[in-house]
Amino acid sequence: MPSVIAMMERREARAREVLDGAEARLREAEEQAGEARQRWEFARIGRQELMDELAAAGAQASQAAADAGAVGDGPQEPDHETEVPSRRAREGYDARPSQWHEGLNRQALCGMYRQIFETVVAADGLVDVATIADTLGQGREKLAVERVRHRAYALHAKGWLEREKGLFRPAAGLNGGPVDDRASAGARRRSGG
């Protein structure tokens, strides 16, 4: 009888190992599904915000044309001086940063964009997004870090920050000027100039 009991114990131990492995894979799959769900949500929100801004810009352009009463013979060039209505009118959103240019300083940035820029300027060298979020009191939860990352990438795209392998540093001096020609060339390239 002892051999039957030993055999049953080994069978139970193997079944337990299989169960533990399956549960670990299930937890990993649930985590991956949660991350994928969050990426999908960010993409959906970004698309909706873009559509809202484009619709508002189109409505503003139509209103401006109607106010002017001008119907041209051909397509008209868009007025680059006219500011596209931004999400700043919507509660909880900061105005997007402007493209950096000569004479523009950090005072041109609003809300969290300015806080992120000032945190990166105050940091000694390259700084990661989680550290920026933590410094700003946002914590290191994934959603808070992603909010900061989104804004840091926007600052990078507008020539305010430089990015190296996911780490950020000021691409601008304390008054908002490029540190070197490489940074200003990158800003011109991103702006299409």
Image: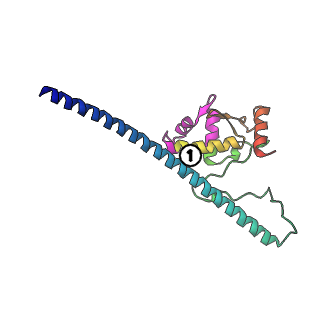
Quarter of the image where the N terminus is located: top left
106 magenta-colored: no
Residue at the extreme left: 1
Q: In front here: 120 or 71?
A: 71
Q: In front here: 92 or 77?
A: 77
Q: Residue 123: percent from the left, percent from the top?
A: 61, 31
User: In screen coordinates, is 74 left or right of 161?
Assistant: right
Residue 183 lies in quadrant: top right
As drawn, 16 above or below 57: above
139 magenta-colored: yes
Q: Residue 144: percent from the left, percent from the top?
A: 52, 44
Is any part of residue 114 visible from this angle? no
User: In screen coordinates, is 111 left or right of 22?
Assistant: right
Q: Residue at (67%, 57%) from the top-left corner?
A: 86
Instruction: Write the start and end of the magenta stretch as one range.
Output: 114-143
User: In screen coordinates, is 137 left or right of 155?
Assistant: left
Q: Residue 141: percent from the left, percent from the top?
A: 48, 41
As drawn, 121 above or below 37: above
- Dominant SS of magenta comes to helix
Q: In front here: 48 or 152?
A: 48
Q: Residue at (47%, 43%) from the top-left corner?
A: 32
Q: Residue at (13%, 26%) from the top-left corner?
A: 2
User: In screen coordinates, is 127 left or right of 69?
Assistant: left
As drawn, 15 above or below 42: above
- Amino acid bearing label 1: Arg
Badge 1 crowding class, 10 Å Cα cut-off, few under 14, some 14 to 19, many 20 or more, is some
Q: Which residue is mark 1?
A: 147
SS type, badge 1: helix
Quarter of the image where the C terminus is located: top right
Q: Residue at (79%, 37%) from the top-left corner?
A: 185
Is any part of residue 153 visible from this angle? yes
